[in-house]
Image: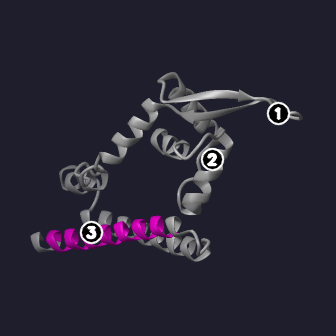
Amino acid sequence: MRLPLLALLARGPAHGYELKQDLEQLLGSAYPQPNVGQIYVTLGRLEKTGLIEGEDVAQSSRPNKKVYHLTDAGREALRAWYEETADEPRVRDEFFMKLALAPQTGLADQIALINTQRRQYLNTMRQLSKLAAAEDRDNRISHLLIEGAMLHLQADLDWLERCQEELEELE
């Protein structure tokens, strides 16, 4: 949550609730909705580390609100984030550990594990399809997020098929 908040503040000052709404509007319903409490805790931490500064702004009929802006250090941290590449492919995969260890324990059948995981992926794919149909057509970022998740799921489904083929050959 740290770096996405810095990215939103790069375009100009904002308060926590505004940042929450901006994230929700940008990412749509496919992305887990941020908790406003988490946002304010993160803003407090960012302020303590000098990446943002907050300023109390008086409001006539409501309590003061704190508006945050990016510092030079925050802008530099954001630049560094954009220059980093994303994590490498998953090598530490919990499902694969279950699959690899199942024969040694005798507590689970590998093909049954694959079928259970396949059902989960297909259910998730259906849910994402429904989200895509319900999402605002103009929110291209949200649609890209959903499409990316579906492409990852399809790759995972293909990999499960490959695992099953290999395991059935061993039998």
Residue identified by numbered label 1: 59
Earlier sequence position, callout 1 versus callout 2: 2
Q: What residue is at 19 percent from the left and 56 percent from the top?
A: 103
Quadrant containing the C terminus is: bottom left
In the image, what residue type sits under mark 3?
Answer: Leu
Disc 1 or disc 3, which is closer to the eye? 1
Place of residue 137 in the rendered image (x, y in percent of width and height, measured from the top left): 59, 75
- The residue positioned 45% from the left and 34% from the top of the image is 74
- Magenta-tinted stretch: 143-167
Pointer 3 local density, CA inside 10 Å: few below 14, some 14–19, many at least 20: some
- Whether residue 159 sits left or right of residue 25 in the image: it is left
Residue at mark 3: 160
Element marked by disc 2? helix
Q: Point out the residue furthest to the left here.
A: 170
* Residue at which label 2 appears: 20
Q: Are marks 2 and 3 in contact (CB under 8 Å)?
A: no
Mark 1–mark 2 contact, CB under 8 Å? no
- Depth order, front residue of 111/1: 1
Residue 159 picture location, percent across and down: 25, 69
Q: Position of residue 150 (x, y in %)?
A: 41, 70
Q: Per the image, is 51 magenta?
A: no
Look at 34% across and 69% down and name the residue there: 115
Q: Looking at the picture, how far across and down is residue 152, in whole percent?
A: 35, 66
**Amino acid under disc 2:** Lys
**Mark 1 and mark 3: span between their CA atoms?**
56 Å
